Image (cartoon, rainbow, N blue to C red):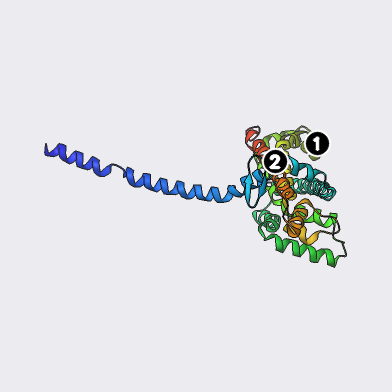
Amino acid sequence: MATVSANFRAADARRPLIGKRSLADWLLGAVAGIVFLALYAPIFLVFALSFFRTRRGEVQWDSFSLDWYGALFSNAEIAQALVFSLIVGFSATLAAIVLATGIALYASVPQRSERTRAVLEFLVFLPFLLPPIITGLSLLILSREIGLPRGFITISIGHTVFVLAIVYRILLTRIQAVSRNVLEASRDLGASRWQTFRYILLPQLGSAMAAAAMLAFALSFDETMITLFLVGDESTLPLRLYAMMRVGFTPEINALVTLVLIASVLLALIAARFIRGRVGDIEP
């Protein structure tokens, strides 16, 4: 009996403290819930206010309409800013894809030294890691010194420098996943470097390029601080939104913010789907 009692006491000593663990889990869940509420409650509020009217600070839930979206699309200044943002985003994304592909191919050569690769990646990632105000101010000083007027070109350069790190990281990961035996076999069969890239490597980079392009475009479309230093006569959509808020908050802003959020989320989800769905297409 003494032995049995000792075994029960030992089992009780090893039994996890369920009550304490449950309390800790509950506290962590409460903290996580408060954080998510603080992060996403304003977004849902803006989304709701884009469809309903307010009177004396109270939402009229029986006033659902699309009037603010109609007023938004009839605003010529917003339409012009949207077109300009799309042009800048496409230009910066295309430039980043071309530059990142070349840099990633150069860095992925096995004979390249680790120091050279480290310096190269430091230069690529530095503008993305620096505060946007530093990047924007640096590019502003550079453009002034070389006599380049602020406008489409300076904004496109700034956005390209900003998104280059994301595109480079995605493409480098995909290039490193490609089997070196396939590339060497192509060269052994008489293919040139360009033919190997065109017919062997480029098709396997398609999904990575698509994902990187969507992420880069989303970042470029939402970029504000760098654009603020480099903008000229034309304005991007985020800057137009900022100007609208300075002169007075109107319900059209809720509709504009909702559309920008939806577009950004969709691009991010599609890019994530490309990255997850096609990660197994290449055999290491």
* In-image side of 206 versus 1 (left or right): right
* In-image side of 113 versus 231 (left or right): left
Q: Nearer the viewer, residue 23 or 283?
A: 23
Task: Please report whichever mark, 2 or 1, sits nearer to the chain's N-terminal start.
Answer: 1
Q: CA distance from mark 2 to mark 1?
A: 32 Å
- Give amino acid for label 2: Leu
Q: Quadrant of the C terminus?
A: top right
Q: Residue at x 65, y 32 (%)?
A: 281
List x then y, in percent, for residue 210. 73, 39
List x then y, in percent, for residue 262. 69, 42
List x then y, in percent, for residue 192. 80, 38
Q: Quadrant of the N terminus?
A: top left
For label 1, the SS is helix
The answer to whether 2 is drawn above or below residue 154 in the figure is above
The answer to whether 204 is drawn above or below residue 92 in the figure is above
> Residue reaching furthest left?
1
Q: Note whether residue 100 is visible.
A: yes
- Give amino acid for label 1: Gln
Q: Note whether residue 283 is visible.
A: no
The residue under label 1 is 195
Q: Residues within 10 Å of mark 2 (few under 14, many from 20)?
A: many
Quarter of the view holding residue 115: bottom right
Residue 204, numbered circle = none
Q: Residues within 10 Å of mark 1 (few under 14, many from 20)?
A: some
The residue under label 2 is 267
The mark lying in front, picked from 2 and 1, is 2
